[in-house]
Amino acid sequence: MNRIELHNITKRYPGCIANQSVDLVVAAGEIHALLGENGAGKSTLMKIIYGVVKPDAGHILWDGQAIAIKGASHARDLGIGMVFQHFSLFETLTVAENISLSLPPKTDANMEALKARILSVSERYGMRLDPDRQVHSLSVGEQQRVEIVRCLLQDVKLLILDEPTSVLTPQEVTVLFRTLAQLAAEGCSILFISHKLDEVRALCDTATILRNGKVSGDCDPKVTATSDIARLMVGDETPLNENYVKAEPLDSRVSRLMVKQLSARALDAFSCPLRDVSFDVKSGEILGIAGVAGNGQEELLNLISGEQTSAASSVLFDEVQVGRLGPAERRQLGLGFVPEERLGRGAVPNMSLQDNTLLTAYQSGLLSAGGWVQTNRVVSYARSIIERFNVKTAGVSAPAKSLSGGNLQKFILGREILQNPTILVCSHPTWGVDIGAAILIRHALIALRDQGAAVLVVSEDIDELYAISDRIGAICDGRLSPIDSVSKVSIGQLGQWMAGDFNGPELSGVTAASQQNNERELSV
Amino acid sequence: MDLDLLLNVLFATIRTGTPLLLIALGELVCEKSGVLNLGQEGMVLMGAVSGFIATVLTGSLLLGVIAGMMAGMLMSFLFGVLAITLVSNQVATGLALTIFGTGLSAFLGASYVGVGIEGITAWNLPFLSEIPLLGQVLFSQDPLVYLSWSIFALVYICFRSTRVGLTVRAVGENPEAANALGMSVFTVRYLAVLFGGAMAGLAGAYLSLAYTPLWSEGMSAGRGWIALALVVFASWKVQRVMLGAYLFGAASIMHLVLQGMGFEISPNILAMLPYVATILVLVVIASDAGRARLSAPLALGQPYRPQW
């Protein structure tokens, strides 16, 4: 018996075809992966299943019956639950209030009974939750549990999860996978959307791969080679060279960026104070800092970029105390900065690429002596970014907001790298970026490192940090873990650091990558 | 200060605080749903002039009150069409509504300036009004004061323990998520805005029919703005709105009291008190950005466009 069957689903938007004749079949109790790059049509397909987008053609069978899903509430009535990548939670309401809002109006009459149900369901699936906590005080992993428990309380038959692991620590991923396996064993179908092939391999029974709105293949991820699946995702043209070369031994190198006993109080109830953070980044190395969002990364980056100031001696660039300097002065000393938020901080959405180039690169000979903008030079500078970093855009006068996330990220990173920074700080460099573009960005970071720059990468993507970093650490609750060479830090160790346990016994003896796979396979 | 004077001051405080309470309750509900309507002042004036005209024409105070509320709702409906349906900027639209209401009310009421009516009179509640001291202050008021208390209780209970209240908060917190859960953001916001209009209109009718039974241009004297500040002062909490309304009410009549007691201060300086208090309150609240962010509806003032 198939839980849901999609046949020949087609959805066109002006100027593009999001889904073209897509077929997808998910059996009862099956964990099915939906793989594909950004813009491959995964989200549109999900929204069609969840009833918020109407397909132009094609039909859907639910439990063998032809059906037209009329909207989100109809989908929920059928037993379709969805956990969005960006949680649809209300931050200032409690867990129980959030959940009660998604239940049919009559069932929440008794709040105490609902709390008891939440507790029993969350215990049963190993996802502890306190129904009285306000959502904004929960960690991201806990917020995801709220979303999942919310679906479970509605007797879900098909649970759709959109990139659920991107915000979790490795330990939390293990718990999540155990929960999903338990659900599947009880007969619930799971549609798992991801681009992380290792996870799909560990968790899923079957996989459907989308490219450019079409199904490019179906496979059993447990037997098909990872490289073959990646090839189905990106097509034949994109090179997939994932050999990242580590830096030579570091002992004799000079420290370019030093942070000494940096502390900062929380700016508001939603931010995290920094507690006595010290580290250095040497010339010719990439330092990776892992951590779940909201643990002080943003505050740390603001203090390094100069958007916030600190005691002068807390931040040093090449031995110069810069703690009191502003962003422009720090850039003059050789800092390049790629913020997490691309539109709004990395680039001004409504300004052209040309003008966005000028924003940080104006000191690279783009102004005349009198301070006049040399338009020709700006244009050629912007063109060289577009060419070297393979940015897909209509041209230098296209507004920044017209670019896709990955292309804009390539542009911003290119703008910073072409200024030959001696220190480059980037936050989540490949978040939401296609595999092809991500590989290009990683190679660009490594090339900059090999020129002698100190590169600091803050990311939630642990696989990426292991791939490109020379040394690695984690940040939790505003405190920084010890930092060590990547070859000496196991993924289990890093996970403990990300959870704030800086002293626990090290789980050594296995290499990082194989241990990661072992853990995840054990968990399912 | 002797006891009689104190009781009179308290009595007057409640009378003066009532229109503030009504406007602020309406604005609170409106803001909880994520809509910032700066048109309160205009809606109050339209409520005042419509209520007054209706009473003069029909001789019925009840019809006057109803007309006042209808006028406020009509104005807020106009706001809703612009700011919710057509997704215009809420701040600019609200300001325009105030200017529009001020002008239109002056135009409509031009020939009614100086006309006298028999206003709404006090209604001593049986038994309750005979309680010594308390009865004199609380239960010898006019019916609209009692009405304002009932509305307060209703709003309080609604936000405290009903799904309706939860829905309004959800929409003001995260309209996209609320929509994904199948709530109609538009309907909730329209209803909240209309409620705000009705309350502002009622407050206007209270001014022109009960507080000072006459019509004069601009008679709301900035109460719409004070009520807006009150909602911030109250950190969007219903019970604090009532406290704030009466505190501001007390500040407004202080100049009369002090003059009566023979203080040699210019009455104009004293009359500024509530407005100075408003500014001070806003500054104090804004200085603690974190707390303000926790209590204010997260999507306040942000227009909502359906994505799909």
Image: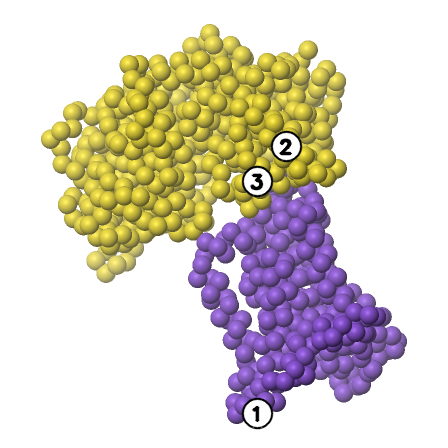
Q: Colour of chain A?
A: yellow
Front in this rendered view, residue A161 or B234: B234
**Which quarter shows the N terminus of chain A?**
top right
Q: Does residue A505 sit above or below A290 in this rendering?
A: above
Among numbered discs 3 and 2, the one appearing first in the sequence: 2
Q: Quadrant of residue B31?
A: bottom right
Q: Quadrant of residue A384?
A: top left
For the point 32% across and 52% down, which residue is it? A308
Would you call the spot at circle 3 few (<14 residues within 10 Å), some (14-19), or many (20 or more)? few
For the point 75% across and 85% down, which residue is it? B113
Chain containing the residue with disc 3: A
Chain containing the residue with disc 2: A
Q: Which residue is mark 1?
A: B262
User: Is residue B107 toward the left or the right of residue A200 in the image?
Assistant: right
Evaluate if marks 1 and 2 touch, with contact meaning CB atoms under 8 Å apart: no
Q: Secondary structure at mark 3?
A: loop
Tell me residue B4's x, y (percent).
68, 83
How is the protein colored in the picture?
Answer: by chain
